[in-house]
Image (cartoon, rainbow, N blue to C red):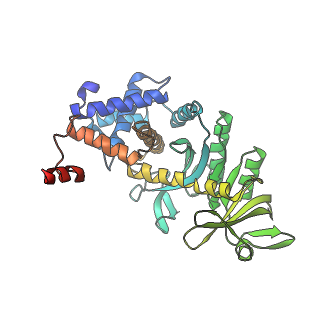
Amino acid sequence: MVSRLYASTRSLWEQVATAIAALDVGRGRPRRVVEVMALYVTGPILLEKGQTAVRIATVLPGRAHDALNRLLRVLPWSPHQLILSLVRWVQRQTGPGYLCLDDVVVEKPFAKLLTWAGWTYSHSKQGHVFGFHIVLLFWCTKTLRIPVGFRLWRAKREGMAPYRTKLELAQSLIANVLRVGLTFEYLTFDLWYNARSFTKWLNEHEIIWVSTLKSNALITYRGRTQPVAEWAQQLPRHRIAGRTWAWVGTVHLPRYGIVRLGVATNGQGGVDYIVSNDLHRRGKVLLHRKRSRWDIETSFRDTKQLAGLGACQCRVSQAMERHVALVLLAFVVLQQLRLAPSETVGEVKRRLHLTVIRGDQPASGAAIASPAEGKIMAAA
C-alpha cells in the first residue's frame, strides 16, 4: 500500500502509522485493517475540509475509496475498543489528570436519512439545527486532551431504538473508565449535567466533581433559603486571582446536601456560581477546576476544524460512529506529532502541510528578510 502513495505524502502516512503503533491501537487487529485505519486518519490531517472517503482516496491513493467505506461499514473492529486502547495508553502516562464532560452538536443539514440525525438545539447557533449530539469524556492534563469515551445521542423519536438521555450516556461513560481503573483528580462539567441524580451517583462512587449553578438555584445559608443570585449580592468578596473577586463557603443546597460554593466574578461583567462536593477546597482551586472545563471546548473546536468531525457523508449509523472514533484518533495523533509540548495541534497540522508541499526539502531562502537580517543588509 505504501508504494501507491505519492512521494510527498508517504512520509506523512508513515508518521501517522508510527504514532498509531505507539498508542497500541492496532493490537489484535489484522495488519491490513490497521494500515487502512492509518490511511483514513492521515486524510483529515492532510485535508483542510471535506474529509470524505472519496477525497481521502484521491490525495492518498494507497487504497480505493471502497476500501475506506468498508472500513467504516463492514470491517470487524469496534470504535469503543479503539477508545479503550486510548484509555490504557493514558493509564501508562505519568502525572495526574482530570476528566471533562460535555456534548457537541454536529450539524448534518442534508442527512435526512441518517438514523442519528434530527432537529436539535445548538447553543453556538442559538437556534435549532438538523444534526446529532456526541457526548464526550476527555482526560486532560496541561499538555494532553485524550478522549476516553463517547456516545452518539439524538432527540427522542417515536419508533426508534430505546431512548437514553445524555445524563444516562454520561454516567455509562464514567462507569466504563472506573471499570478499567483510570485514575483522575476530579470531574468537571457545565450546569446542564448538574442534575441531582447524576451528582448523587458521583458521590456514591467517591468522585470529586465541579460544576456551576443557575442563578435561580435555591440555597440555604444560616437558616435562610433564597436564590443564589439574590444571596450573592449581599456577600463580601476578596481577590483570589488577578481581577477575580470571590466568596467561598459551605452551604446547603436542597436535594444535594452540604456543598462547597464559590461566587466569583468572571471578567465579563457577570458572576459564576461554582459548586463542588469537595468541602475543603479554597476558592482559587475551585476557580481553576471550573476554568479547566474549557479544555473540552477547545477539543470540540479542534476536532471540527482540524480533523473533520462532521465530514462523514455515509448514511449508515455504524459508519458515522466509526468516523467519530477515527477523528478522535486523528486528534490524538496530532498531539503525538508535536515537536514540543507548547506546540498546538493547529501548528502541527500547518507544519505537516508545509512538509508535504516542500516534499521534505528545506526552503531555498526566505522571500522576505527578517528584521535582524534587514539591519545587517542596510549597514552593509
The part of the image, by quadrant, that contains residue 30 is: top left
Residue at (78% x, 46% y) in the render: 204
3 versus 242 height, above or below: above
Q: Quadrant of the N terminus?
A: top left
Pick whichever, 95 or 252, lies toward us: 95
Residue 20 makes an appearance in the image: yes
Judging depth in this view, the residue of 6 and 151 nearest the camera is 6
Q: Going by the picture, which residue comes out furthest to the front?
A: 379
Whether residue 25 is visible, yes or no, is no
| Vertical arrangement, residue 146 with respect to residue 102, above or below | above
Question: In the picture provided, is 364 more to the left or to the right than 33?
Answer: left
Q: Residue furthest left?
A: 380
In the shown orientation, is residue 373 left or right of residue 204? left
At a point 46% along the width and 28% down the height, the residue shown is 22
Residue 239's x, y, as percent?
65, 66
The percent position of residue 256, horizontal first and vertical second, equals: 78, 59
Point out residue 147 in the picture as x, y percentages from the top left corner.
53, 42
Question: Where residue 93 appears, x then y in whole percent?
Answer: 56, 33
Number of numbered callouts drawn = 0
Lateral position of residue 162 relative to residue 41, left or right: right
Identity of the residue drawn at 26% across and 34% down: 9
Picture layout, residue 66 above or below residue 243: above
Residue 244 lies left or right of residue 120; in this view the side is: right
Q: Residue sitting at 53 percent across and 51 percent down?
A: 295
